[in-house]
């Protein structure tokens, strides 16, 4: 592989990193702010009794608490400890990483000339999250969903911030950003390296044959999404680098499935939910995303 | 390692924040991202630098603050994660980005069309031929591909040279990359140019400014409009090589 292709890979890599930075920062600011300042009490009063409406409002919590998959589990634990029904929390978990202002802004930035990607990302994510939430409501046995030890295992971080005083709180807010920034940037670098150099190293014929096929392209991108646990506030920039070689359905599958289920998310889910529940969340998310994006590839894509 | 964690991470904040600022100062930002995002990117870069300075001062003054640090043990905040960030900063400061090459253009698939863009754009067609850019010409020809309707129209374009295997001899593509967001989505667009090899020689990726006129040509058994080259000069790579 000659050096020109490598330099192009470097250019793409740096482009992703530079373009994504504002959204890393936004995500970090939002996350630290929520952890320091926001109490979850008001949510409890706002959730409707009707299960469909409850699932729907669970999906929208991300607009108030814009967290990606890193931040949604700690928040979910807080909600569970405050007795929010598990199925609503599950809907929140699956939907919030996409249905929030930061991810909408990032997706818009990346796909500004193909806005149907943005709209469909939102629509599919909402549908999948609500469907899974309602399935859990109808069929899930409550004692088999949440880990029984949650009440004893919970830590300081699972409760609202207890720091008193405006200045200490503000300083905690500021300093809380550093750690999260490091994490997000590290995983972003990893993803960006893969995105830029996979297309340099893998022979073009292989990429084209996988990427243009309506079915394998979706499977490949979902596999990538599951393995590369990149935060949802910047994953649009990763997906963007495949936009010329993969079907739109595949790009959508990455953008819908990735924020819900990946290696990191599964590890975090297992701290709060039982293994069976985690399995079903993953399996249902996979199947529903596959069906929706296949449908799009075959019938709706231009 | 834990003792130095705040120090290392503060420097990472500074390092990552300063990347875009460095590119902006050296006029390389246009190689990476669509210029409409420059302000947003620079604002966040300065914020990161500010945060890095704040954390550095806090470390040097040994001020402890209670922080909700829930992932303190994650692998991302140790060797592997630090290596990734150090690699990013290292690449960013040591390897200069370049305009994407014709090689990448070929592998991404060159298009003489602009799919998904409204073709019947009255405003574009009303621009006189010699003032049309590459994009304008592509739109014009997409709307009205018949070469005879443009026969003799003057053409003045800048772009880089691309030799493509499907072209007949004495032809090259004059090309540019279109970007929407950043280099990751850059897509090449081009038009074919016919030239006299006795007069000119061209190498891939050379930036040129050309003059010519539209004529009918035959490419892969299709009758298409090509540019007949009359004059050209080499130009230096523009600061903003992409069209948006």
Image (cartoon, rainbow, N blue to C red):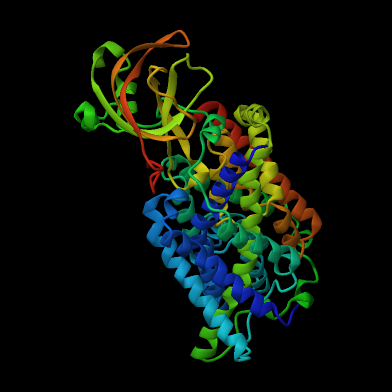
Judge left or right: residue B147 versus residue A123.
left
Judge left or right: residue A259 versus residue B169.
right
Residue at the far front in the pictured view = B198
Q: Nearer the viewer, residue A171 or A286?
A: A171
Q: Position of residue A97 (x, y in %)?
A: 57, 57
Q: How many marks?
A: 0
Residue at the far top in the pictured view = B221
Q: Position of residue A103 (x, y in %)?
A: 51, 56
Does the image show residue A20?
Answer: yes
Image quarter of residue A85? bottom right
Residue at the location (37% across, 20% down)? Answer: B199
Residue at the location (53% across, 38% down)? Answer: A243
In the rendered image, the quadrant that contains the C terminus of chain B is top left
Image quarter of residue B52? bottom right
B20 is higher (above) or lower (below) than A83: above
Does the image show residue A272?
Answer: no
B56 is higher (above) or lower (below) than B37: below
In the rendered image, the quadrant that contains the N terminus of chain B is bottom right
Judge left or right: residue B184 versus residue B60.
left
Q: Nearer the viewer, residue A58 or B137?
A: B137
A271 is higher (above) or lower (below) than B227: below
Q: Position of residue B13 (x, y in %)?
A: 57, 71
Image quarter of residue B195? top left
Q: Nearer the viewer, residue A137 or A174?
A: A174
A60 is higher (above) or lower (below) than B10: above
Q: Position of residue A151 (x, y in %)?
A: 76, 75
Residue at the location (56% across, 86% down)? Answer: B57
């Amino acid at each position: 592989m000659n050096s020109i292709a490598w330099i192009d890979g470097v250019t793409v890599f740096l482009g992703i990193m530079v373009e994504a930075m504002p959204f890393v920062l936004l995500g970090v600011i939002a996350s630290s702010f929520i952890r320091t300042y926001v109490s979850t009490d008001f949510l409890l009063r706002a959730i409707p009794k009707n299960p469909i409406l409850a699932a729907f409002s669970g999906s929208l919590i991300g607009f108030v608490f814009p967290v990606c998959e890193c931040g949604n589990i700690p928040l979910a634990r807080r909600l569970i400890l405050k007795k929010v029904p598990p199925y609503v929390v599950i809907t929140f978990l699956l939907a919030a990483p996409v249905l929030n202002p930061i991810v909408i802004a990032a997706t818009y930035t990346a796909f500004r000339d193909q806005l149907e990607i943005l709209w469909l990302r939102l629509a599919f994510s909402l549908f999948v999250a609500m469907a899974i939430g309602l399935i859990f409501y109808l069929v899930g046995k409550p004692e088999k969903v949440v880990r029984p030890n949650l009440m004893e295992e919970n830590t300081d971080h699972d409760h609202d911030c207890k720091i008193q005083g405006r200045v200490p709180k503000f300083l905690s807010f500021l300093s809380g950003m550093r750690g999260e920034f490091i994490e997000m940037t590290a995983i972003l670098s990893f993803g960006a390296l893969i995105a830029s150099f996979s297309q340099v190293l893998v022979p073009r014929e292989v990429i084209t044959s996988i990427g243009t096929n309506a079915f394998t392209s979706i499977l490949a991108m979902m596999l990538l999404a599951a393995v590369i646990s990149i935060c949802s506030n910047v994953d649009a920039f990763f997906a963007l680098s495949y936009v010329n070689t993969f079907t739109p359905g595949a790009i959508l599958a990455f953008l819908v499935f990735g924020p819900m289920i990946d290696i990191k998310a599964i590890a975090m889910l297992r701290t709060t939910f039982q293994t069976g529940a985690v399995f079903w969340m993953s399996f249902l998310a996979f199947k529903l995303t596959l069906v929706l994006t296949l449908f799009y590839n075959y019938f709706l894509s231009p | 390692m834990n003792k130095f964690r705040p120090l290392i991470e503060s420097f990472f904040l500074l390092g990552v924040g300063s990347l875009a600022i460095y590119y902006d100062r050296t006029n390389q930002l246009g190689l990476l991202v669509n210029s409409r995002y420059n302000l947003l990117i620079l604002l966040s870069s300065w914020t990161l630098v500010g945060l890095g300075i704040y954390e550095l001062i806090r470390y040097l003054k040994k001020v402890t603050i209670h922080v909700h640090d829930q992932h303190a043990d994650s692998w991302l905040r140790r060797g592997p994660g630090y290596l990734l960030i150090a690699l990013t900063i290292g690449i960013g400061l040591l390897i200069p980005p370049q305009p994407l090459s014709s090689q990448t253009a070929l592998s991404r698939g060159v298009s003489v069309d602009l799919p998904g863009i409204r073709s019947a754009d009255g405003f574009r067609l009303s621009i006189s031929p010699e003032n049309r850019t590459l994009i304008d010409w592509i739109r014009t020809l997409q709307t009205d591909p018949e070469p005879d309707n443009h026969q003799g129209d003057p053409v003045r374009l800048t772009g880089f040279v691309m030799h493509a295997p499907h072209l007949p001899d004495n032809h090259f593509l004059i090309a540019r990359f279109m970007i929407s967001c950043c280099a990751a989505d850059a897509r090449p667009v081009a038009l074919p140019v016919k030239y006299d090899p006795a007069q000119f020689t061209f190498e891939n990726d050379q930036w040129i400014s050309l003059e010519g006129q539209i004529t009918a040509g035959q490419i892969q058994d299709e009758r298409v409009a090509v540019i007949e080259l009359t004059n050209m000069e080499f130009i230096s790579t523009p600061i903003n090589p992409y069209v948006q």
